[in-house]
Image (cartoon, rainbow, N blue to C red):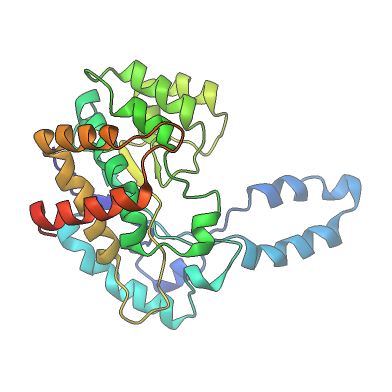
Amino acid sequence: MKSRRPACVVDVPEKIADVLNSVLDWDFLKKKAARQESDGTGDWIDLLSQAATWLVPMEVVCPPIDMTALDRLDPLIRALRDAGAKGTKDSMIAAYGAHINAEIPALDAEVVLAYLQAFSLLQWWLVDAHQVDMARRISPYVDLYPEAYLQVLFSYDKPDFTQMISDYLIYNPTRNRALDLLPLLSCVHADMIQNAVADPKIKPRPAFHYRLPNCQIDHPDWSLARSWNLWWVVEELAQRPEDLTMLKERFLSMHRPLIGVNRTDWTVWMDQWLCDHLSA
């Protein structure tokens, strides 16, 4: 079941210049520019274009790469840093992050459910482990799954894709989740996803879109391996069905009417359990 081909947020081009000239998300600007000739907004669109250089983050991507080959990206990261690339703390608005698109081992309900439950058990712990920047925590981009959804997710008797997708869309009809499952679920039932979330940016992709880690490319000692090593905890837990069952039961047992599960208590308990049972 192990997923070992992350597609990271940096590219491996032949020339570093290709990266520095990567395309911004100009969709909104292009639509406005198309109306310039008829409504005389040329000056306005120029100003908006200039503003986009600091409002719209530049995203650099690469095709799937083996986990053991992550060091191939180090020269690119250094070149971007030397060219002035900035990370999460540089903008309170853009909330820059490092995304990992980890390839799913098999596109079946049992595997997806195991990963989804493993992440959900760990999501509060991962926020602390990644030291997610406060600006990103309060932004809508990396919202966690609501506890009401966890109550449903941890109560499944057996995996069923249609039911799983239906429940996911009830509680998470958005791309803005720390673990965005919409691209993966679109590989199974694209019509269900599009009917619930009419967003052209959702493209079918057999991978987990993990959006939680900060981007610290401007730090000399930062490496993509740090973010991957914490995602690895999800990977490892997903391979342990007996532990998943025990942890789900433990989480549900800690639920209290009106107040739910105490986040601090669960995170502390989970941290100790991981220290006792997993070696990262």
Task: Please identify the quarter of the rendering in which residue 220 is found.
Answer: bottom left
Q: Give the quarter of the figure containing the N terminus.
A: top left
Q: Is residue 168 left or right of residue 277?
A: right
Q: Is residue 41 left or right of residue 167?
A: right
Q: Position of residue 49 (x, y in %)?
A: 71, 62
Task: Please identify the quarter of the rendering in which residue 147 is found.
Answer: top left
Judge whether 159 appears above or below 142 on screen.
above
Judge whether 262 appears above or below 156 on screen.
below
Nearer to me, 95 or 74: 95
Nearer to me, 110 or 40: 110
Outermost residue, front side: 257
Q: Is residue 99 something one can see in this rendering?
A: yes
Q: Position of residue 25 (x, y in %)?
A: 58, 53
Nearer to me, 157 or 174: 157
Q: Is residue 112 left or right of residue 15?
A: left
Q: Give the quarter of the figure containing the C terminus.
A: bottom left
Q: Residue at x 81, y 45 (%)?
A: 35
Q: Residue at x 40, y 71 (%)?
A: 216
Judge whether 189 appears above or below 30 on screen.
above
Q: Residue at x 47, y 19 (%)?
A: 191
For the image, the number of numbered tags is 0
Q: Position of residue 144 (x, y in %)?
A: 43, 44
Judge whether 231 appears above or below 149 on screen.
below
Task: Please identify the quarter of the rendering in which residue 156 is found.
Answer: top left
Q: Position of residue 241 (x, y in %)?
A: 12, 33
Q: Is residue 64 something one can see in this rendering?
A: no
